[in-house]
Image: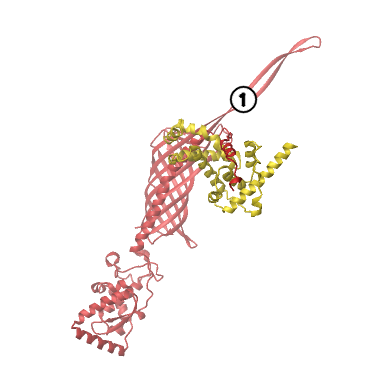
Chain colours: A yellow, B red
């Protein structure tokens, strides 16, 4: 079934197409939700809510991007709204601190699952900005608008996230060598 | 800062990463959630529409009334400010100037008098002093009065009540000889307006000067002596439109009972009433009401089975004499089987409410206590009605129902005729099931809004 047929079927409320959409993307979106949410349960709730939104709004999908990209964006926005509703307090850091970060090849020797575990262990603020910037590819300007924070705050959160990740990588490598 | 992002390969790996989830997260669960969301929208939409309609009608009513009958603070003008006796020098000077101009222009006195009156009317509305030339050549200076009463026809001005004229005549006896009779009547009427305005200036009560056709009130003889009481001239009838919603959650999943229900009941109620003011803040009324009573939930059936297993085996005792002993081992097992399912019902009904309202002031806020019973009939039923421990299919479409509502909340006077009441309430829903020969009832708490209109 092509993407177009899938979308059209879902708009027609065709159960087979709707199930196909679930089977095809639910695990990937679960992985995305896990990166933003605090717990497995919260991520599962977010996934279900995201799918409700996706089914309801598929008629607005214009095929200007791939279906998966659009679904990822819907899910990210939903997770961001959840984070914003929690009224997380974002903190800024100085420019000097911002320059501290991980090495370019820091992740080369690590499995994706391992990195994911590290990202999941980050505090909410670091994790959110890190996910949006490093993985989803948003700019700090976009992130500041999405989260309702300053651009500088977004940068500083990212810097802190990198610093925290580097510490974890160092520990991990140290542990492996020992 | 692009270099700080993961490289594309790693990002792709991240985006292709799949994570498992628990059994509760299924396609069916998502669709069920979606259905619930839709149902919620369908249920709340009419309620929101009715409340929005009430607000809109109240707002439009306010706008309409504020244009046509708004409360205006009464002019705080005494008679001393209204009429000032001219001094002789200025009077003589003005008289000469006027006479000369009249003769020069060849215009009759009557015309000038009427022209001056119309000019005076315009000026009076602008709240500036003006000079009035009376037919007998007296000039009076008037301060600004309400322009409306000065604009009226002279024949209307001559209509006021005799009793008031007599009182006013006594007060103005010193100037009456030199002032035109019509002007004196106008002054009397100004006095009347002041007399029949609430001294606090809250209610404008016209006795027929400015808007005679609309608002003229024939005041019977002897009424003037009575104390000010606007209620005497008011209607005792009121119309009321209201909407209320509420809910109740039923939770009983403690496994103590074989069958337990987890559910939520909602209700929406719309009604229109005619109320009669009985005095002392009490109103009685009746009307028509439409209500929906909906329940969504799930049931859980816990079946406990006690099983006894008896195992036997032979044991050979090797001590001489060798013998075989049969041993019986008894095991008691409690097997629990849980079955769940969904449950819904919907009951629509029409009823004729019998209502009583009690209005009171607590501090500076007006409050209203509302109670009513709604005997009626169900118009449409479907699904299974449930309580904490049981559910029954609703077979009958037409059943007798009896609802009751108790509400208490603040009321706000939007205008002198429109009042908005906010009503937190508790509503009893009940119906009699003919086929089951039993009645069911539940009390749901909620919130309502009501608009009251005075006729």
Asked if residue B126 is positioned above or below residue B448 in the image, the reply reads below
Instruction: From the viewer's perspective, tell me whether residue B419 is left or right of residue A94.
Output: left
**Chain ID for label 1?**
B
Q: Position of residue B169 (x, y in %)?
A: 30, 80
**SS type, badge 1:** strand
Residue B98 versus residue B191: which sits nearer the camera? B98
**Callout 1: 10 Å neighbours few (<14), some, many (20+)?**
few
Q: Position of residue B363 (x, y in %)?
A: 50, 62
Instruction: From the viewer's perspective, tell me whether residue B433 is left or right of residue B10.
Output: left
Q: Name the quadrant containing residue B259.
A: top right
Whether residue B252 appears in this view of the structure is: no
State how many labels appear.
1
Q: Position of residue A26 (x, y in %)?
A: 53, 35
Asked if residue B211 is positioned above or below residue B430 in the image, the reply reads below
Give the quarter of the figure containing the C terminus of chain B.
bottom left
Q: Position of residue B360 (x, y in %)?
A: 46, 59
- Residue tagged 1: B306
Whether residue B189 appears in this view of the structure is: yes
Residue A89 versus residue B362: which sits nearer the camera? A89
For the point 65% across and 20% down, the residue is: B309
For the point 49% across and 47% down, the residue is: B445
| Furthest residue toward bottom | B89
Residue B250 versus residue B95: which sits nearer the camera? B95
Residue B344 versus residue A47: which sits nearer the camera? A47
| Furthest residue toward right | B320
């Amino acid at each position: 079934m092509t993407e177009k047929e899938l979308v059209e079927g879902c708009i027609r409320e065709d159960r087979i197409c709707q199930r196909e959409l679930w089977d095809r993307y639910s695990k990937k979106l679960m992985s995305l939700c896990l990166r933003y949410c605090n717990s497995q349960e919260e991520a599962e709730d977010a996934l279900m809510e995201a799918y409700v939104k996706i089914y309801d709004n598929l008629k607005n999908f214009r095929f200007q991007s791939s279906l998966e990209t659009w679904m990822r964006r819907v899910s990210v926005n939903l997770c961001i709204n959840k984070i914003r509703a929690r009224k997380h307090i974002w903190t800024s850091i100085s420019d000097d601190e911002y320059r501290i970060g991980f090495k370019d090849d820091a992740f080369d020797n690590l499995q994706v699952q391992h990195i994911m575990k590290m990202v999941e262990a980050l505090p909410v603020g670091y994790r959110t900005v890190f996910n949006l910037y490093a993985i989803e590819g948003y700019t700090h300007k976009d992130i500041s608008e999405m989260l309702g924070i300053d651009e500088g705050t977004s940068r500083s959160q990212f810097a802190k996230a990198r610093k925290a990740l580097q510490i974890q990588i160092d520990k991990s490598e140290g542990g492996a060598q020992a | 800062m692009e270099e700080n992002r993961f490289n594309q390969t790693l990002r792709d790996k991240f985006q292709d990463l799949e994570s498992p989830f628990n059994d509760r997260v299924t396609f069916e669960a998502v669709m069920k959630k979606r259905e619930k969301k839709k149902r919620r929208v369908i249920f709340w939409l009419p309620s929101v529409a009715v409340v929005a309609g009430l607000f809109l009608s109240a707002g439009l009513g306010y706008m309409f009334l504020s244009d046509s009958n708004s409360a205006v603070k009464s002019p705080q003008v005494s008679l001393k400010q209204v009429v000032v006796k001219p001094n002789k020098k200025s009077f003589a000077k003005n008289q000469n100037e006027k006479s000369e101009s009249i003769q020069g222009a060849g215009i009759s006195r009557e015309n000038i008098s009427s022209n001056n009156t119309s000019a005076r009317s315009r000026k009076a509305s602008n709240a500036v002093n003006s000079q009035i030339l009376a037919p007998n050549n007296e000039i009076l200076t008037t301060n600004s009065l309400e322009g409306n009463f000065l604009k009226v026809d002279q024949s209307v001005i001559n209509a006021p009540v005799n009793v008031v004229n007599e009182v006013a005549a006594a007060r103005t006896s010193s100037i009456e000889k030199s002032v035109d009779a019509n002007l004196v009547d106008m002054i009397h009427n100004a006095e009347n307006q002041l007399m029949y305005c609430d001294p606090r200036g809250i209610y404008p009560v016209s006795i027929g000067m400015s808007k005679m056709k609309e608002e003229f009130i024939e005041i019977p003889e002897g009424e003037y002596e009575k104390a000010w009481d606007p209620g005497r001239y008011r209607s005792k009838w009121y119309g009321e439109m209201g909407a209320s919603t509420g809910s109740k959650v039923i939770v009983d999943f403690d496994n103590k009972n074989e069958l337990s229900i987890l559910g939520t009941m909602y209700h929406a109620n719309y009604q229109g009433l005619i109320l009669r003011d009985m005095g002392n803040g009490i109103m009685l009324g009746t009307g028509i009401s439409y209500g929906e009573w909906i329940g969504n939930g799930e049931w859980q059936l816990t079946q406990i089975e006690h099983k006894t297993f008896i195992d036997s085996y032979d044991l050979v005792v090797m001590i001489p004499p060798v013998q075989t002993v049969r041993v019986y081992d008894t095991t008691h097992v409690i097997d629990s089987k849980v079955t769940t399912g969904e449950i819904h019902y919907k009951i629509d009904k029409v009823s004729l409410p019998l209502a009583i309202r009690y209005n009171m002031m607590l501090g500076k806020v007006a409050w209203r206590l509302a109670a009513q019973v709604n005997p009626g009939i169900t118009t449409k039923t479907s699904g299974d009605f449930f309580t904490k421990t049981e559910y029954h299919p609703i077979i009958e479409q037409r059943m007798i129902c009896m609802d009751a509502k108790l509400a208490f909340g603040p009321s706000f006077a939007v205008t002198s005729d429109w009042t908005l009441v906010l009503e937190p309430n508790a509503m009893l829903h009940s119906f009699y099931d003919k086929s089951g020969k039993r009645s069911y009832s539940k009390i749901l708490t909620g919130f309502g809004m009501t608009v009251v209109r005075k006729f």
